[in-house]
Structure formats: C-alpha cells, structure tokens
C-alpha cells in the first residue's frame, strides 16, 4: 500500500455560514484521513475556502463591506466549526492567500506560454449565480439548466482554455480507470456528458464585470474565472511550482471528495487542466449525494438550513458525525430530520455501543474486582469464535469498506460485533453463572471476550468518533495515544489485568423520540388469507402456495381459513404493506420440548430481533449462524411456547420447509426486500 494519503474536500464559498452539506464532505474526509493515519500512512488532509468570484463579491456588497474583510469575518466560522467537529485537517487554504494566488498566476502564465490559452470573442447565455456561460442548446425558457434562474445574453472578449483538445483523452482515461470517477453512476454521467462535443472553457472575466479575483498575469484587464482559481488549490498548497519535492510526495491526490453538483467542474475542467499542465489526474473523484431536510430541498428561503453548530450543541459532535455517515450510503441522497437523528442515536449509540460498554464494565467491577479478566473456560465456543474472528478482522474489513468508500457499511460491521457481544452476554447470563461453583471463571471468559471486542471497536471507531473512542479506551483502562497508533492484537497478554475506569455513559438515551422500530402494525392477515404468504407452525397445517413462509409465528391476526389452492389476486398496495427485510442470523437454538421450533436472534442493521421459526426439522441451529435470511419485519409480535417472536422468516416449501430464502449478493442486513 502507498505510504502517503492525500485527501481533499471542496473549498467552500465564503458567501454564508457553513451548513450540513459542508459538514458532510468534511466529516467524510476526516474519517478517511484518520483511518489512513491509524493504518500508519502519512496523511495530508486539505480543506479551505473559495474566496473569489461573483458569489462572494455579491455577498460582500450586500453586507456593505470590502470582499476581503467579508471573507476575513466569515472564515473563522468555518475554522471554528471544524475544530468543534474534530476535523483533523493538515492545512486550511484560503484562495486569497499569496501562496495560492502566486501559483494560479504561474499556472496561467505557463498555459498561456504553451498556447493552451487564447483570446476570443464570446457570446452566450450567462448565469450570474453559477458564474458560467451556457450554450444555446443548454438553455430552455431562458433559464439556467443548473439553478433554474434566468440567464442573460452576454458578449465579451475573453481568454479560453483549449479544453476541447482533451476530450478524446479524457474519455479514454475514464474508460481505462474505473476508479477515477465514483460511484459508477457518476462515472456514467460524465461519460454521457462527454458524448457531446466539449467546448473550450472561458477562464477569464473582464474586471469591468467582476473585479474580485486573481489578475491574469498576461492581461491586467481580466481576473481568472473563479473555478480555474479554486481548482488549483489542490496543487498550489502541496507545492506545485513552489516546492516540487514536496509536491511530488503528495500528487496525485488519492481522493477529491465532492458533492454531485460539482462533478463536471472536477471531472472535466480540472482533469483537462491537469492534463494540459502535464500532471496526472487525482486517483479518485468521489461525488456524494445531497441532503434534503424532512423531504424538502434545503434553502435559506425555506428557512430549513441545518446548522451544524446547533447539531453539535444538541447532540454532540460525535453523534452528528456518526449520523451523517451511518444514515445514508455515501453517494446517495439522504433526508435529514431531528427524528431520524434521535432514532439513530438511541438505537446505535445509546442502546448499542454505550450500553455494551457500560454493562461490560459494570460486570467487570462486580465480578472481576474492576480488572480486565484473563480468558477462562469456554462458555459458548461458537459465539466466542465469532466474536474473536469479527474483532480481529474488523480493522481490515472496515478499511475495505472505506476504500470504496462505504462508510455506512463500515459502521454496520462495528454494530454487528456489538450485537454479537450483547447476544453472548444474554445467552451466557453472567448473573446466573455467578451463582454456580465454577461460574467465576466462565464469567471471566464472557467479560474477556466483550472487553476485547470493545478494545478493537475503540481503535476502529476512532476514525469516526474520535472523542468517544478515546473515552472508551480510557474507561477500558488503556493508555492509548491515537496520534501514535498501534493496532490492537487479540493475543496481547498485557490487556488482562488492566484496571478499568468506568465513567459516565457514552451516549445518554434521548427521551421523546417519536419513532418505534416495531411500530408498524399492518393488515398482514389479509395477505395470509389470500394465500400469498403462508405461515408454517406446529399448530396450523400449511397449504401449498407459490411463496411459502416458514415461521413459528402462527396466523397473527385473523383465524386461518382453509386456504384456497389458487390465491386470489391482491393489489400492489396490499403487497407493499408487508415489510420484508434482509437479516443476519446471529444465533440459533432449539426451543426446549419442540422438534420444530428454533429461536433465532437476527441482526437488522440497526436493531436486533428475536424470531421463533418452525424450521427445526430442516435445519440444525449451528448451520444457521451467520446466514443471510429474509424476514417479514412488520408482523405483530406474538408468543410461541411462551417465547416472543418478533417477525417471520421466509422459506420455500409446502407441508415441510425445504429451504430458507436468501439473497444472491452480500447485501447489508436490514435492507428492504421488494
Ligand atoms: N466553491 C465551490 C467548490 C470549489 S472546489 C475547488 C463550491 N462551494 S459551495 O460552498 O457552494 O459547496 C461546497 C459543497 O457543499 C459542494 O460539494 C456541495 O455539493 C455541498 N453541498 C451544498 N449543499 C448540499 C446539501 N444540501 N447536501 C450535501 N452537500 C451539499 O461549490
């Protein structure tokens, strides 16, 4: 693996205070930077501000102050937010800094000298808000195709960059480098864009129209187009044309993280600019999705802009960081709401991580004199092996998820380990073991495994939630210095014997959440009666059907009529009332005194369920461990032989279960099945 890692965020316009969109990319970049440092890589993480151009000039004008003063007043808002969000950037560029402006001018001069920049007349449709010209075919009804604001006809002499000359090269480059533009949908979007002839790019603005910019070195009547200026930050800061040895260390960048709206400027303008300078393109440009707020586009006029500072005040920096990256797969659009945030914090952080740490440490205090115990005799070999394997591979697996990057999947892997531990505690019942003569040694085994898992989790989670991870490490009695990271080893025999220092809960539960995971109560009986889904259990004989479901849960609502052999048709709305989800089997055990019933604990990504299924004649419990199954997730819970079943497992079969239903791909647990 390359020992250096250079990652960038867009540089943000200083025309207003930061919002959730700015925080999103910056937190994502921070996680990748921190993870690379944990891996031992030398990291350069760059973020900053885009201070020139029309947007900033207009905002300053509105405020009635000089643009530079305006930027100077607003810049600390970004810098302070990054401090509060624990952003570990190595540099912070402002495009008005001489170290940047000098390189922009040198770059312009170099391209001008090479004949890559020329002067010409240009007439076109200009969008002031986007600061760009559009061609005739782009503009419909006199509106900018991007921001939908009116465009104006403008004719002026400008300087142009010969971008069109690089069209074929760029197409080939994208085709040959599948990782260059990601995710694949965005890559296809750019390839689609490149099917049209690429025009040359106007890279100047006459000072008469816009004075707030970097002066062209070869014509004092013009300033550089703000995008030409801004994109150069990715090379000016690491030392292009000013500190070549240092520049060679970092370039090409490993990741440019951007939002989907600035994909063209990065993948087309920037890549061709680099090509004309004889520089390699960045290794990956990743365009993430956009956040809406409670289903609506975020905007000042709607008054629904999410202020990251308010989120930190209300929920804490780590919880906000976690939410941003766990809630929505990176690359897709997501919806923000306070409710979603509270639900996520309560389920994953308070009930999940915080509770596991707290119960483990409480038991270590109670049963092991406040010291991490050494491993004793095995209590449940399969679960112990699973926990150990999961913990030992966690760093590598999360690293693989971050290579793409799939933050939500990395965090799901962490949650699965917590779920394994919770289940292990519940099934091994240390409190009951405490009453047995040899119980103390077995309790030691349970708490040894859980504290090992937590130790490994703390290391990995440092990238996502640095304060929380440091707190976890401290409470586990570890004197870790995350700035000099050393990956934990399971066999490290200095861990047992460590004195713990149990502290306050990591994430107190937030009361007043409006959501309930089991809330949906639907008319599933209708479907059952119509013969589309069948319930197999020890009481009700199963009639034949196209899609059979096997579970111990008998007909949940209505009495089961003698089923018709041909199912009556149902509407799609009827079908959509059934919530089907993927789930991973965490544990399975036979229900005492039943030949048929197996009690499963399953993981749904953000929650755990217990399901009693009538599959015991077909399967041995151990064969089910780790299997990916499909469940009906919104079935009213009910008791079978006194045990609550919170869902139904789907299986094929008629009178007998022939096989469980699964999915072809390795999809995450909790995914909707439709
Ligand atoms: N200054 C340019 C970038 C120059 S990079 C050489 C710019 N700045 S911006 O401040 O307008 O936007 C910065 C980033 O915020 C973009 O990546 C954009 O996608 C992101 N977001 C703005 N609103 C957003 C959401 N509602 N959701 C997620 N990100 C969004 O463009």
Image (cartoon, rainbow, N blue to C red):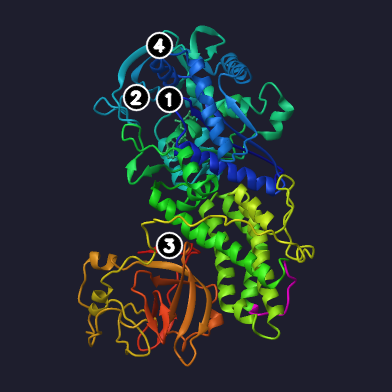
Dot 3 corresponds to which residue? 671
Where residue 589 sits: x, y (%)?
52, 83
Whichever of labels 2 and 3 marks the residue nearer the N terminus, that label is: 2
Q: Nearer the viewer, mark 2 or mark 1?
A: 2
Main SS of the magenta part reads loop
Q: Nearer the viewer, mark 1 or mark 4?
A: 4
Q: Are marks 1 and 3 in contact (CB under 8 Å)?
A: no
Q: Marks 1 and 4, Cα distance to the nearest angstrom?
A: 23 Å
| Residue toward you, 31 or 18 | 18
Instruction: Give me the disc on residue 135.
Output: 2
Q: Residue furthest right?
A: 494
Instruction: Give me the disc on residue 199.
Output: 1
Segment tinted magenta in the rendering:
372-381
Whichever of labels 1 and 3 marks the residue nearer the N terminus, that label is: 1
Q: Quadrant of the C terminus?
A: bottom left
Would residue 617 be counted in the magenta stretch?
Answer: no
């Amino acid at each position: 693996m390359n020992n250096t890692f250079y990652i960038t965020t867009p540089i943000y316009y200083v025309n207003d205070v930061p919002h959730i969109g700015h925080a999103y990319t910056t937190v994502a970049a921070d996680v990748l930077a921190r993870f690379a440092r944990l891996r031992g890589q030398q990291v350069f993480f760059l973020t900053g501000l885009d201070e020139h151009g029309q947007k900033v000039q207009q905002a300053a004008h509105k405020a009635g102050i000089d643009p530079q003063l305006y930027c100077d007043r607003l810049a600390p808002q970004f810098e302070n937010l990054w401090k509060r969000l624990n952003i570990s950037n190595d540099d912070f560029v402002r495009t008005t800094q001489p170290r940047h402006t000098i390189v922009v001018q040198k770059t312009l001069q170099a391209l001008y000298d090479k004949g890559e920049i020329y002067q010409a007349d240009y007439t076109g449709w200009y969008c002031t808000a986007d600061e760009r010209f559009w061609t005739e075919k782009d503009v419909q009804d006199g509106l900018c195709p991007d921001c939908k604001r009116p465009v104006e006809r403008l004719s002026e002499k400008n300087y142009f960059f010969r971008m069109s000359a690089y069209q074929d090269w760029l197409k080939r480059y994208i085709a040959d480098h599948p990782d260059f533009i990601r995710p694949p949908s965005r890559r296809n979007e750019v390839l689609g864009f490149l099917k049209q002839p690429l025009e040359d790019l106007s890279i100047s603005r006459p000072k008469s129209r816009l004075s707030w910019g970097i002066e062209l070195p070869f014509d004092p009547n013009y300033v550089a187009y703000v995008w030409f200026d801004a994109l150069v930050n990715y090379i000016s800061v690491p030392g292009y044309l000013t500190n070549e040895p240092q520049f060679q260390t970092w370039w090409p960048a490993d990741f440019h993280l951007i939002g989907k709206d600035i994909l063209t400027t990065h993948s087309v303008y920037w890549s061709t600019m680099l090509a004309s300078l004889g520089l390699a393109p960045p290794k990956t440009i990743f365009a993430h999705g956009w956040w809406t707020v409670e289903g609506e586009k975020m905007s000042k006029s709607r008054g629904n802009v999410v202020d990251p500072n308010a989120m930190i005040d209300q929920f804490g920096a780590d919880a906000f960081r976690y939410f941003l990256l766990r809630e929505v797969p990176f690359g897709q659009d997501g919806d923000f709401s306070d409710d979603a945030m509270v639900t996520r914090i309560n389920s994953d952080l308070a009930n999940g991580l915080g509770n596991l740490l707290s119960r483990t440490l409480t038991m270590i205090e109670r049963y092991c004199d406040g010291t991490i115990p050494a491993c004793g005799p095995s209590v449940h070999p399969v679960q112990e092996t699973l926990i150990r394997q999961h913990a030992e591979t966690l760093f590598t697996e999360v690293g693989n998820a971050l290579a793409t990057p799939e933050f939500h999947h990395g965090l799901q892997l962490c949650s699965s380990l917590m779920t394994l531990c919770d289940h292990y505690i519940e099934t091994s019942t240390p409190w009951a073991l405490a009453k047995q003569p040899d119980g103390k040694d077995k309790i030691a085994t349970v708490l040894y495994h859980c504290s090992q898992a937590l130790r490994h989790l703390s290391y990995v989670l440092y990238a996502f939630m640095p304060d929380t991870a440091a707190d976890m490490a401290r409470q586990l009695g570890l004197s870790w210095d995350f700035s000099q990271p050393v990956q934990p080893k399971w066999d490290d025999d200095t861990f047992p014997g460590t004195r713990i220092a149990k502290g306050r809960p990591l994430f107190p539960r937030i009361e007043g959440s409006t959501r309930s995971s089991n809330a949906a109560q639907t008319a599933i009986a209708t479907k059952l009666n119509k013969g589309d889904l069948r319930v197999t259990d020890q009481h009700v004989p199963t009639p034949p059907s196209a899609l059979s479901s096997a579970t111990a849960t008998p007909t949940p609502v209505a009495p089961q009529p003698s089923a018709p052999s041909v199912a009556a048709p149902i509407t799609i709305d009827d079908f959509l009332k059934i919530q089907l989800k993927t789930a991973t089997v965490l544990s399975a055990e036979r229900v005492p005194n039943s030949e048929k019933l197996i009690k499963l604990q399953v993981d749904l990504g953000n929650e755990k369920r217990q399901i009693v299924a009538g599959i015991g004649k077909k399967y041995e419990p151990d064969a089910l461990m780790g299997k990916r199954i499909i469940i009906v997730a919104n079935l009213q819970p009910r008791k079978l032989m006194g045990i609550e079943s919170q869902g139904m497992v789907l299986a094929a079969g008629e009178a007998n279960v022939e096989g469980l239903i699964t999915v072809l791909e390795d999809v995450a647990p909790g995914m909707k099945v439709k």
